[in-house]
Image: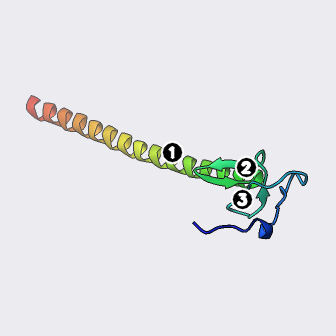
Amino acid sequence: MPRVDPARVETWVCATHHERIAMGVCVRCGAPLCQECMTNVEGALYCAPCTCQFRRAGTRTHRRALRSLFAKRNDILVLAVSLLVLSLVLYGAGLALAAR
């Protein structure tokens, strides 16, 4: 592992709390973050605004997946009802022909 010269390391301050030393950087916007401002989402650090955007995007994806699932369930339901109606019609036609 390469050695870091402490004299060359800049001290970053948090983008929100200017009196605090930054402990990380937002992976999306690059804002320096103190311990309080960091949010770990799926192993990556985000600032508060980027966390909100990440979660909103995830919610939209989740809703889209649910809509797709319900659409598939509706297709299966329509198919099942159609087959039931068809079988009842054919059964009724068979009874009508047998009664002649």
| Image mark for residue 26 | 3
Classify mark 3: helix, strand or loop. loop
Q: Is residue 69 left or right of residue 64?
A: left
Classify mark 1: helix, strand or loop. helix
Q: Residue at x 29, y 37 (%)?
A: 85
Which residue type does callout 2 highlight?
Answer: Met
Q: Is residue 61 left or right of residue 87?
A: right
Within 10 Å of the Cα at label 1, are there few (<14), some (14-19), or many (20+) other Cα atoms?
A: few
Q: Nearer the viewer, residue 9 or 28?
A: 9
Estimate the spatial distance between the alpha carbons at disc 1 and disc 2, rounded to whole Å.
30 Å
Q: Position of residue 80 (x, y in %)?
A: 31, 39
Q: Image quadrant of residue 90? A: top left
| Image mark for residue 84 | none
Whether residues under marks 1 and 3 lie with C-beta atoms below 8 angstroms apart, the answer is no
**Sequence-first tag of 1 and 3:** 3
Classify mark 2: helix, strand or loop. loop
The residue carrying mark 1 is 66
Within 10 Å of the Cα at label 2, are there few (<14), some (14-19), or many (20+) other Cα atoms?
A: many
Which residue type does callout 1 highlight?
Answer: Leu
Q: Residue at x 78, y 70 (%)?
A: 8
Q: Image quadrant of residue 95? A: top left
Q: Position of residue 41 (x, y in %)?
A: 62, 49
The residue carrying mark 2 is 38
Q: Position of residue 70 (x, y in %)?
A: 47, 43
Q: Is residue 66 left or right of residue 97?
A: right
Q: Residue at x 78, y 44 (%)?
A: 36
Q: Nearer the viewer, residue 12 or 72?
A: 12
